[in-house]
Amino acid sequence: MMKAIEEEELLQEWEGLLDLQTQVLGEGEVAWLRSREFGTGCGVLEVGSAAGGYGGYLARNFPGTPIFGVEANPHLARRFRRNEASPPNYSINVSKIGEDPIPETARGRFDRCILRFVLQHVSDPARVLRAVHDALPVGGRIYVIEEDLSFLTTRPAWKPFQTTRDVWLKVTADGGTDAMIGSKLPRLATDAGFTVDDLNIVLRNNVEMGAAFGDYLTSVIRLFQKNNPDLVTEAEVRTVVDGFEASRDDHADHFVATYPQFLMTATKAGDR
């Protein structure tokens, strides 16, 4: 979904969305990663680094761990190289996992791999997982963080939330990607040759996430419209933007919507 983006405005929109995603979800993800021995290996391959915002965040939280980012979109990767404040244990190379070889600077230097909101954006997630499996040593581990829109629910009906979900499904269907991949992760990992260690389903809610809940979904819908102007209407965007703004105070202490994260670890037990 992101590989063809090169216009400056869209690149900035993606960066803004990914930064907000990290602000809202990053702390909980790091706690989960620590509990699953994320930083105890020799190094980590980060697949789908974008401009390095999340990878840099991880590198600062795991300063003793080399993290090797790979990103298919050279325009996004180039934005990271302009960032002089990047942590010393983090780097990004341009590479499309499943088609290109692992960059020479990372080859043989990692025994962990993180795929965060990557598999939902590619047309062939099985190929990506097989390539990662082949690149890891025996005993290497993957950490996968994904969404699943079948768990994106609201009771009672909340119009801006429902519109966001409907648009999200429409865009992913048009792009040939899977917005409901979370529940399929164990099967995909097993088919790629991994042994699944655990799968956690975390349902965040609008009260817990606060104003950032609406801000995040508003950013999603804005980006979808700019990236797919023939598919997502201005009316749909306005329904989401105005709706979340109008209901910001009404739902501050009422649980009406859930946002799902699927967190999976799996290990390479041997050659396929």
Image: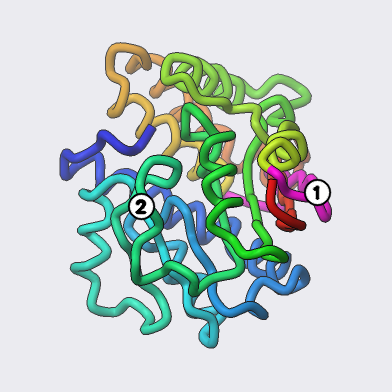
Determine whether label 1 and label 2 are within 8 Å by CB. Answer: no
Could you say where residue 100 lies in the image, as x and y percent from the top left?
A: 35, 47
Could you say where residue 51 lies in the image, as x and y percent from the top left?
A: 32, 57
* Residues packed near mark 2 inside 10 Å, few (<14), some (14 to 19) or many (20 plus): many
Mark 2 element type: strand
Q: Nearer the viewer, residue 143 or 179?
A: 143
- Name above or below for residue 268 compared with residue 254: below
- Name above or below for residue 68 compared with residue 232: below
> Please, what is the three-letter code of the amino acid marked with disc 1?
Leu
Q: Nearer the viewer, residue 200 or 209?
A: 200
> Please, what is the three-letter code of the amino acid marked with disc 2?
Glu
Could you say where residue 165 lies in the image, as x and y percent from the top left?
A: 58, 23
Mark 1 element type: strand
Q: Main secondary structure of the magenta part?
A: strand
Tag 2 residue: 71
Tag 1 residue: 199
Q: Which residues are magenta?
A: 193-211
- Name above or below for residue 155 compared with residue 105: above
Dividing the picture into quadrants, the one containing residue 2 is: top left
Could you say where residue 223 lies in the image, as x and y percent from the top left?
A: 35, 34
Q: Locate residue 146 relative to residue 63 in the image: left or right.
A: right
- Name above or below for residue 44 compared with residue 241: below
- Quarter of the image with the C terminus is top right
* Residues packed near mark 1 inside 10 Å, few (<14), some (14 to 19) or many (20 plus): some
Q: Is residue 234 visible?
A: yes
Dividing the picture into quadrants, the one containing residue 27 is: bottom right
Dividing the picture into quadrants, the one containing residue 180 is: top right
Residue at screen point 49% across, 74% down = 109
Marks 1 and 2 sit apart, C-alpha to C-alpha, by 26 Å
Residue at screen point 63% across, 51% down = 210
